[in-house]
Image (cartoon, rainbow, N blue to C red):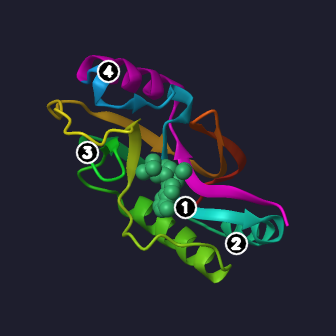
Amino acid sequence: MSTRRLFFGIGLPQTIQQEIIAWRAAAFNAAAGRPLAAANLHLTLAFLGEVSDEKTTAICRLAGRIRQPPFTLHIDDAGHWPRPGVVWLGLRQAPRGLVQLAEMLRSQAARSGCYQSPHPFHPHISLLRNATRPVAMPPRDFHWQFDVAQFSLLQSTFEQGRSSYKVIESWPLIA
Ligand code: 2AM
C-alpha cells in the first residue's frame, strides 16, 4: 500500500518569506544551523505521518467541512529547541482561530486513525534545522503580520538530505 507523509499547514505570503530570509541572514551566523529554503517556510497545524490514499480521501472530506473565519497572524516571537535542533519563529499570542483550526484538524485526523503528535500545539515556523548547539538568539524586535484565508494539506518529501513541501489541496477559511 502506498503512503505519503502529510501534514496540514499554512503557507506564508512570498513577500513575507523574502523578508524573513533576509532578516535570518543578518540575524544568525552560518554555523547556527541549516536554513530552510524560503518556499519551504510554513506553519504546521497538524502532522499526520504516513497516510494511505484511502485515509487521505477521508481527511480531505472532513477538512472540507470546516467552517471558520479568516484570522491574522502576528509573527513576533522566536526560539530555539536544541533537542530537535530547530530555530523557529512564532507568536507571543496565538489567535483563537488558529488554535481552533489546529484542534479541529487534529481531532479529525485522530478520528480518521492518523498519527497524532503527543506534544501540545506550539505554532511555529521552522527557520533553521540541525541547530543542536547553543544559538545566540537575536533580539525579538521584528513583527511580520499577514492574514490567513486558507489552509492546506501538504506532502513532505525527503530527497538528498532535505525535506521539501508540496501543496496537495487547499481550503478557504469562510465564516
Ligand atoms: P518542524 O518544522 O518543527 O520540524 C513537516 O515535516 C512539518 O511537520 C514540519 O513543520 C515539522 O515540524 C512537522 N513535524 C514533523 N514531524 C513531526 C512530528 N513527529 N510531530 C509533530 N510535527 C511534526
The earlier-in-sequence mark between 4 and 2 is 4
One can see residue 70 in this view: no
Query: What residue is at 85 percent from the left and 67 percent from the top?
Result: 1
Q: Residue 80 carries which label?
A: 3
Q: In this view, does 122 lie above or below 59?
A: above
Please report the bounds of the magenta region as a residue range: 1-27
Tell me the kind of residue under disc 2. Leu
Q: State whether label 1 is within 8 Å of ligand 1.
A: yes
User: Is 98 in front, or is 38?
Assistant: 38
- Between the C-alphas of marks 1 and 4, the distance is 29 Å
Residue under label 1, please give it: 47
Residue under label 4, please give it: 30
Residue under label 2, please give it: 62
| Quadrant in which the C terminus appears | bottom right
Q: Is residue 57 above or below residue 5?
A: below
- Between the C-alphas of marks 2 and 1, the distance is 16 Å
